[in-house]
Image (cartoon, helix red, strand yellow):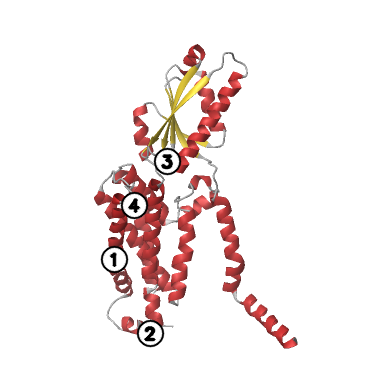
Amino acid sequence: MKKFAGFVKKEFYHILRDGRTILVLFGIPVVQLLIFGYAITNEIRNVRIAICDRSRDEVTRQITDKLLSSGYFILDEYLQDINHVDEIFKKGKVREVVVFEADFARNLEKHGTAQVQLIADASDANTASLIVNYTQAILQDYISRQNAHNQPQLRIDARVRMTYNEEMNSVYMFLPGTMTLILMLVSAMMTSISIAREKEMGTMEVLLVSPLKPAQIVIGKVIPYVALAFVNAITIIGLGYFVFEMPIRGSLTLLLAESLLFISMALSLGILISTLAKTQKVAMFISVFALLLPTLLLSGFIFPIENMPVVLQWISHIMPPKYFIIIIKNIMLKGTGFIYVWKETLVIAAMMAVFIAISVKKFKIRLE
């Protein structure tokens, strides 16, 4: 029994000396709990809205102040013309436009009812429903307080219009994120094991004695997978269009070009992982587990980024899937052109260049 206790003690020492084991045991659960705890929420916060006030009276100002003081909404801008609603939605910042009818206060006083239109960007159906429900609740609270001192009872008629997804089809929200997740993980996984495989199989010497430069080897590793992953992207887009009836309202050529860019970026990230990993198992672990949770939680795929704490919002800025999901929704659902997605395109291209540059720098000229 004493020998067994000594063996167990030795195992404790062995585990405590291994920093990677301690990280897996204690670090990862803490990080996952914090991310899940803050990212997974059904509440909305800091949602950008626009106001189109065609009445400009005291009542509409009070309602606007009540909306903005609730803590749920941030005023992005005042619209002078309701015809600008589609344009402001295409910019991607505003989630809802509140439109007050002309003579709002007079209609409320004279007829006992006034109309307000709530126009929501339903490319994310769940978030749009929450935003509209929160807005209606605030309007109802305002009119209930007014009715406590008024007879007869007043009423605000809220007319709801969902844009880009009138039927509130949930597949419109999940399909762009699923496309991004598949392309990101599969592409990164394919290339992450390439150089690691060369190291394990001992064939790296063949590459090292060849006249090819490190940059040529790294880029050469990426190119074959680009064609294969692009076929995968075409298949996914085809399934989304023909099977799930996901519309493609924008340019198909632009959508394919953006998909090709994103694939190239994901493959470059996979190459970077393979240059850092010593074995195929480590490379696959990083490419799957280290990319899966951030892609799901911090890209805006499932949970709105503006609902998260500021720290997680900062982290989301370095998540490539976030930008590709924005691009897909803009092209497929909103029918926008390159002028509305050029910033996201530039970010993805810059990330690809950074990943390739680091991969070349990390590539070992001599085997360790």
User: Residue 345 shows which numbered tag?
Assistant: 4
Q: Earlier in the sequence, mark 3 or mark 4?
A: 3
Q: In the rendered image, is residue 24 in sight?
A: yes
The number of numbered discs placed on residues in the rendered structure image is: 4
Q: Earlier in the sequence, mark 4 or mark 1?
A: 1
314 or 190: which is nearer to us? 190
**Can you identify the residue that label 3 sits on?**
93
Q: Earlier in the sequence, mark 3 or mark 1?
A: 3
Residue type at numbered disc 4: Thr
Query: x%, y% of residue 319?
Result: 44, 56
- State the quadrant of the N terminus: bottom right
Q: Nearer the viewer, mark 4 or mark 2?
A: 2
**Can you identify the residue that label 1 sits on?**
228
| Gap between marks 3 and 4 measured at Cα | 17 Å
**Can you identify the residue that label 2 sits on?**
202
Q: Earlier in the sequence, mark 3 or mark 2?
A: 3
Task: Give neighbour class at mark 3: few <14, some 14-19, many 20+ (Cα, 10 Å).
Answer: some
Label 2: state its secondary structure. loop
- In the orientation shown, which residue stands out farthest toward the top? 110
Label 4: state its secondary structure. helix
Q: Nearer the viewer, mark 2 or mark 1?
A: 1
| Gap between marks 4 and 1 measured at Cα | 22 Å
Which residue is depicted at the point 51% across and 35% down? Answer: 133
Label 1: state its secondary structure. helix
